Amino acid sequence: MTILTAKNTPRVSYTATANQQAFTIPFEFFAVTDIKVFNGTTLLTYDASADVVTKYSITGTESDTDEAYEFGAGGTVNIGATGITAGSIITII
């Protein structure tokens, strides 16, 4: 059976605590450019050395058991230097 990825977009949402910076990516992805992060409806910008709350970086977790995925065990999104406001809805796609 084939699963069409266009019909199965992985997504997770979090309600942030005060100054929270780290959010788990609980699904597989091939490259950091595959991940999109939203604060509410605002798309944040990827930056490997994110230092403001409008930018994020990603730390991927490589899978030891599945060579087909670069980051088969998910990873972590890190937002800005001081994190975001409590109650913000962070969505990772």
Image: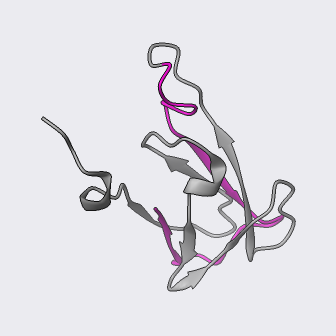
The image position of residue 15, as x and y in percent, is: 46, 69
Q: Nearer the viewer, residue 87 or 70?
A: 70
Q: Is residue 92 magenta?
A: yes
Q: Quadrant of residue 34?
A: bottom right
What residue sits 21% from the left and 44% below the top?
A: 3
The secondary structure making up most of the magenta span is: loop
Tell me: 8 left or right of 39. Answer: left
| Residue at the extreme left | 1
Placement of 40 over or under 78, stated as above or below: below
The image position of residue 36, as x and y in percent, is: 56, 65
What residue sits 65% from the left and 62% below the top?
A: 20
Tell me: 86 left or right of 66. Answer: right
Placement of 16 over or under 25, stated as above or below: below
In the rendered structure, which segment of residues is drawn in magenta?
Answer: 67-93
Tell me: 64 left or right of 20. Answer: left
Q: Nearer the viewer, residue 48 or 66?
A: 66
Placement of 62 over or under 74, stated as above or below: above
The image position of residue 22, as x and y in percent, is: 64, 53
